[in-house]
Image (cartoon, rainbow, N blue to C red):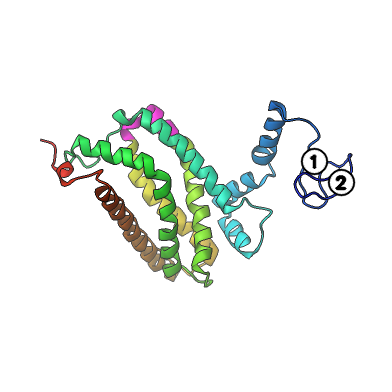
Protein backbone atom coordinates (compact mmCIF):
# COMPACT_ATOMS: atom_id res chain seq x y z
CA UNK A 1 0.00 0.00 0.00
CA UNK A 2 0.99 3.66 -0.31
CA UNK A 3 0.95 6.55 2.15
CA UNK A 4 -2.12 8.68 1.42
CA UNK A 5 -0.12 11.86 2.08
CA UNK A 6 3.11 11.34 0.08
CA UNK A 7 2.43 8.09 -1.89
CA UNK A 8 5.53 6.42 -0.40
CA UNK A 9 5.31 2.58 -0.24
CA UNK A 10 4.49 1.40 3.29
CA UNK A 11 3.53 -1.88 4.94
CA UNK A 12 0.03 -2.68 6.19
CA UNK A 13 1.40 -2.95 9.72
CA UNK A 14 3.03 0.51 9.74
CA UNK A 15 1.60 3.05 12.16
CA UNK A 16 3.48 6.01 10.69
CA UNK A 17 4.91 6.69 7.24
CA UNK A 18 8.71 6.44 7.32
CA UNK A 19 8.96 9.08 4.57
CA UNK A 20 6.72 11.97 5.76
CA UNK A 21 5.87 10.90 9.32
CA UNK A 22 2.10 11.01 8.82
CA UNK A 23 -0.09 8.61 10.79
CA UNK A 24 -1.36 5.69 8.72
CA UNK A 25 -5.16 5.66 8.83
CA UNK A 26 -6.74 2.23 8.45
CA UNK A 27 -10.24 2.87 9.81
CA UNK A 28 -13.05 5.02 8.46
CA UNK A 29 -13.67 8.51 9.82
CA UNK A 30 -15.72 8.54 13.03
CA UNK A 31 -16.35 10.84 15.98
CA UNK A 32 -13.89 8.76 17.97
CA UNK A 33 -11.14 9.21 15.37
CA UNK A 34 -11.90 12.94 15.11
CA UNK A 35 -11.52 13.33 18.88
CA UNK A 36 -8.32 11.27 18.85
CA UNK A 37 -6.83 13.45 16.13
CA UNK A 38 -7.86 16.65 17.96
CA UNK A 39 -6.40 15.35 21.24
CA UNK A 40 -3.12 14.34 19.60
CA UNK A 41 -2.76 17.71 17.90
CA UNK A 42 -3.81 20.08 20.68
CA UNK A 43 -4.26 18.45 24.09
CA UNK A 44 -1.27 16.16 24.58
CA UNK A 45 1.45 17.49 26.88
CA UNK A 46 4.19 17.19 24.28
CA UNK A 47 2.33 18.68 21.32
CA UNK A 48 3.58 21.82 19.60
CA UNK A 49 0.63 24.00 20.68
CA UNK A 50 1.20 23.33 24.37
CA UNK A 51 4.96 23.86 24.00
CA UNK A 52 4.52 27.08 22.03
CA UNK A 53 1.90 28.49 24.39
CA UNK A 54 3.80 27.80 27.63
CA UNK A 55 7.21 28.87 26.37
CA UNK A 56 5.91 32.14 24.94
CA UNK A 57 5.18 32.98 28.58
CA UNK A 58 8.26 31.54 30.24
CA UNK A 59 10.97 31.46 27.54
CA UNK A 60 9.76 33.46 24.52
CA UNK A 61 13.31 33.76 23.17
CA UNK A 62 13.44 29.99 22.66
CA UNK A 63 10.32 30.04 20.49
CA UNK A 64 11.20 33.21 18.58
CA UNK A 65 14.94 32.74 18.11
CA UNK A 66 14.42 29.01 17.66
CA UNK A 67 11.89 29.34 14.87
CA UNK A 68 13.91 32.03 13.10
CA UNK A 69 17.05 29.88 13.29
CA UNK A 70 15.32 26.86 11.77
CA UNK A 71 13.75 24.97 14.69
CA UNK A 72 10.42 24.22 12.98
CA UNK A 73 9.21 20.90 14.45
CA UNK A 74 9.26 21.86 18.12
CA UNK A 75 6.94 24.87 17.84
CA UNK A 76 3.67 25.58 16.07
CA UNK A 77 3.95 27.42 12.77
CA UNK A 78 3.29 31.16 13.36
CA UNK A 79 0.50 31.26 10.77
CA UNK A 80 -1.21 28.28 12.40
CA UNK A 81 -0.87 29.99 15.78
CA UNK A 82 -2.36 33.14 14.26
CA UNK A 83 -5.22 31.07 12.85
CA UNK A 84 -6.08 29.82 16.34
CA UNK A 85 -5.97 33.39 17.67
CA UNK A 86 -8.31 34.66 14.94
CA UNK A 87 -10.71 31.78 15.56
CA UNK A 88 -10.89 32.50 19.29
CA UNK A 89 -11.23 36.21 18.54
CA UNK A 90 -14.19 35.39 16.32
CA UNK A 91 -15.84 33.52 19.19
CA UNK A 92 -15.26 36.53 21.46
CA UNK A 93 -16.94 38.78 18.89
CA UNK A 94 -19.97 36.51 18.76
CA UNK A 95 -20.33 36.84 22.53
CA UNK A 96 -19.70 40.59 22.32
CA UNK A 97 -22.47 41.04 19.77
CA UNK A 98 -24.90 39.42 22.18
CA UNK A 99 -24.05 41.85 24.99
CA UNK A 100 -23.36 44.98 22.92
CA UNK A 101 -26.23 46.88 24.56
CA UNK A 102 -24.70 46.29 28.01
CA UNK A 103 -21.21 47.57 27.11
CA UNK A 104 -20.39 51.16 28.05
CA UNK A 105 -18.77 52.36 24.83
CA UNK A 106 -18.54 56.00 25.99
CA UNK A 107 -15.51 55.41 28.23
CA UNK A 108 -14.61 59.09 28.63
CA UNK A 109 -18.25 60.23 29.06
CA UNK A 110 -18.21 62.69 26.15
CA UNK A 111 -21.83 62.16 25.17
CA UNK A 112 -21.02 60.23 22.00
CA UNK A 113 -23.87 60.01 19.49
CA UNK A 114 -25.41 56.51 19.93
CA UNK A 115 -25.85 56.21 16.16
CA UNK A 116 -22.11 56.79 15.75
CA UNK A 117 -21.40 54.11 18.36
CA UNK A 118 -23.66 51.64 16.57
CA UNK A 119 -21.97 52.30 13.22
CA UNK A 120 -18.46 52.04 14.66
CA UNK A 121 -19.14 48.85 16.58
CA UNK A 122 -20.80 47.28 13.55
CA UNK A 123 -17.81 48.13 11.37
CA UNK A 124 -15.44 46.93 14.08
CA UNK A 125 -17.17 43.56 14.18
CA UNK A 126 -16.98 43.27 10.39
CA UNK A 127 -13.31 44.28 10.05
CA UNK A 128 -11.88 43.01 13.36
CA UNK A 129 -9.68 40.30 11.81
CA UNK A 130 -8.35 42.72 9.18
CA UNK A 131 -7.55 45.31 11.86
CA UNK A 132 -5.85 42.68 14.02
CA UNK A 133 -3.59 41.66 11.11
CA UNK A 134 -2.72 45.33 10.44
CA UNK A 135 -1.14 45.56 13.88
CA UNK A 136 1.47 42.95 12.92
CA UNK A 137 3.45 45.15 10.46
CA UNK A 138 2.96 48.19 12.72
CA UNK A 139 4.56 46.50 15.73
CA UNK A 140 7.13 44.76 13.55
CA UNK A 141 8.31 48.07 12.11
CA UNK A 142 8.38 49.68 15.57
CA UNK A 143 10.49 46.80 16.92
CA UNK A 144 12.78 46.74 13.91
CA UNK A 145 13.52 50.46 14.29
CA UNK A 146 13.97 50.50 18.07
CA UNK A 147 14.95 47.05 19.43
CA UNK A 148 17.03 45.20 16.84
CA UNK A 149 20.34 44.23 18.42
CA UNK A 150 20.63 41.08 16.29
CA UNK A 151 20.03 42.92 13.00
CA UNK A 152 16.99 40.84 12.16
CA UNK A 153 15.21 41.58 8.90
CA UNK A 154 11.80 43.26 8.93
CA UNK A 155 10.32 39.96 7.72
CA UNK A 156 11.79 38.23 10.79
CA UNK A 157 10.22 40.86 13.02
CA UNK A 158 6.93 40.11 11.27
CA UNK A 159 7.25 36.48 12.40
CA UNK A 160 8.09 37.63 15.94
CA UNK A 161 4.96 39.76 16.17
CA UNK A 162 2.71 37.17 14.59
CA UNK A 163 3.68 34.99 17.55
CA UNK A 164 3.50 37.82 20.11
CA UNK A 165 0.12 39.24 19.10
CA UNK A 166 -1.44 35.83 18.48
CA UNK A 167 -0.23 34.64 21.88
CA UNK A 168 -1.60 37.70 23.64
CA UNK A 169 -4.97 37.20 21.96
CA UNK A 170 -5.09 33.50 22.87
CA UNK A 171 -4.06 34.18 26.47
CA UNK A 172 -6.81 36.80 26.90
CA UNK A 173 -9.56 34.69 25.37
CA UNK A 174 -10.95 33.20 28.61
CA UNK A 175 -10.66 36.45 30.68
CA UNK A 176 -12.46 38.37 27.92
CA UNK A 177 -15.26 35.80 27.76
CA UNK A 178 -15.67 35.90 31.54
CA UNK A 179 -15.84 39.72 31.56
CA UNK A 180 -18.34 39.81 28.71
CA UNK A 181 -20.59 37.25 30.39
CA UNK A 182 -20.40 38.66 33.91
CA UNK A 183 -19.56 42.40 33.80
CA UNK A 184 -19.88 43.60 30.18
CA UNK A 185 -20.32 47.23 31.30
CA UNK A 186 -16.65 47.30 32.35
CA UNK A 187 -15.26 45.75 29.17
CA UNK A 188 -14.08 49.00 27.57
CA UNK A 189 -12.61 50.34 30.82
CA UNK A 190 -10.56 47.15 31.20
CA UNK A 191 -9.51 47.08 27.55
CA UNK A 192 -7.47 50.27 27.95
CA UNK A 193 -5.03 48.92 30.61
CA UNK A 194 -4.90 45.65 28.64
CA UNK A 195 -3.43 47.59 25.70
CA UNK A 196 -0.60 48.87 27.89
CA UNK A 197 -0.02 45.38 29.27
CA UNK A 198 0.22 44.12 25.68
CA UNK A 199 2.94 46.68 24.98
CA UNK A 200 4.70 45.52 28.13
CA UNK A 201 4.53 41.90 27.00
CA UNK A 202 5.92 42.86 23.58
CA UNK A 203 8.85 44.68 25.24
CA UNK A 204 9.41 41.64 27.47
CA UNK A 205 9.64 39.34 24.44
CA UNK A 206 11.95 41.69 22.54
CA UNK A 207 14.21 42.04 25.54
CA UNK A 208 14.42 38.27 26.00
CA UNK A 209 15.34 37.94 22.32
CA UNK A 210 17.91 40.78 22.10
CA UNK A 211 19.16 41.17 25.70
CA UNK A 212 19.81 44.90 25.85
CA UNK A 213 21.80 46.33 28.78
CA UNK A 214 19.65 47.95 31.46
CA UNK A 215 21.00 51.37 30.49
CA UNK A 216 19.60 50.99 26.96
CA UNK A 217 16.42 49.06 27.66
CA UNK A 218 14.34 51.92 29.09
CA UNK A 219 15.12 54.26 26.19
CA UNK A 220 14.61 51.63 23.51
CA UNK A 221 11.39 50.41 25.13
CA UNK A 222 10.12 53.99 25.28
CA UNK A 223 10.86 54.52 21.59
CA UNK A 224 9.18 51.22 20.74
CA UNK A 225 6.04 52.16 22.68
CA UNK A 226 5.96 55.64 21.11
CA UNK A 227 6.28 54.22 17.58
CA UNK A 228 3.63 51.59 18.36
CA UNK A 229 1.18 54.23 19.61
CA UNK A 230 1.82 56.33 16.49
CA UNK A 231 1.18 53.25 14.36
CA UNK A 232 -1.98 52.49 16.34
CA UNK A 233 -3.26 56.02 15.72
CA UNK A 234 -2.43 55.58 12.04
CA UNK A 235 -4.61 52.46 11.91
CA UNK A 236 -7.44 54.34 13.65
CA UNK A 237 -7.21 57.18 11.12
CA UNK A 238 -7.13 54.69 8.25
CA UNK A 239 -10.20 52.93 9.70
CA UNK A 240 -12.15 56.20 9.91
CA UNK A 241 -11.13 57.25 6.40
CA UNK A 242 -12.27 53.87 5.11
CA UNK A 243 -15.67 54.31 6.77
CA UNK A 244 -16.02 57.83 5.33
CA UNK A 245 -15.00 56.63 1.87
CA UNK A 246 -17.59 53.84 1.92
CA UNK A 247 -20.33 56.16 3.19
CA UNK A 248 -20.66 54.34 6.50
CA UNK A 249 -19.89 57.54 8.44
CA UNK A 250 -20.67 61.21 7.87
CA UNK A 251 -19.79 64.38 9.78
CA UNK A 252 -23.29 64.49 11.20
CA UNK A 253 -22.52 61.32 13.17
CA UNK A 254 -19.97 63.26 15.25
CA UNK A 255 -22.44 65.78 16.65
CA UNK A 256 -22.48 65.13 20.44
CA UNK A 257 -25.64 63.78 22.00
CA UNK A 258 -27.66 66.48 23.75
User: At which x and y percent is residue 258?
Assistant: 10, 35
The residue positioned 44% from the left and 33% from the top of the image is: 177
User: At which x and y percent is residue 249?
Assistant: 23, 44
Q: Which residue is mark 2?
A: 10
Magenta span dominant secondary structure: helix
Q: Which mark is residue 201?
A: none
Question: In this rendering, does residue 193 appear at all?
Answer: yes
Q: Which mark is residue 24?
A: 1
Q: Which residues are magenta?
A: 177-186
Residue 25 appears in which quarter of the rendering?
A: top right
Magenta span includes 174:
no
> Along the horizontal axis of the image, is 223 left or right of 171?
left
User: At which x and y percent is residue 188?
Assistant: 32, 39
The residue positioned 64% from the left and 40% from the top of the image is: 42
Q: Residues within 10 Å of mark 1 (few under 14, many from 20)?
A: some
Front in this rendered view, residue 144 or 33? 33
CB under 8 Å between discs 2 and 1: yes
- Does label 2 or label 1 sit earlier along the sequence? 2
Q: Residues within 10 Å of mark 2 (few under 14, many from 20)?
A: some
Q: Quadrant of the N terminus?
A: top right
Name the element at disc 2: loop
Q: Residue furthest left?
A: 258
Magenta span includes 182:
yes
Label 2 vs label 1: CA separation? 9 Å
Amino acid sequence: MECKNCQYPIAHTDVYCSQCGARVIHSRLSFSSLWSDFKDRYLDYDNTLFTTFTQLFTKPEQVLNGYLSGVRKRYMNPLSYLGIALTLSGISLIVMREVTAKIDWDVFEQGVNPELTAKLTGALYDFSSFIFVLFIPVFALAGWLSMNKKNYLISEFMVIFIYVLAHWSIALFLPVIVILLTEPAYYMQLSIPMMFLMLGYAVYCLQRVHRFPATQLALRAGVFCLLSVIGYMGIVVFFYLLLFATGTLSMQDFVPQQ
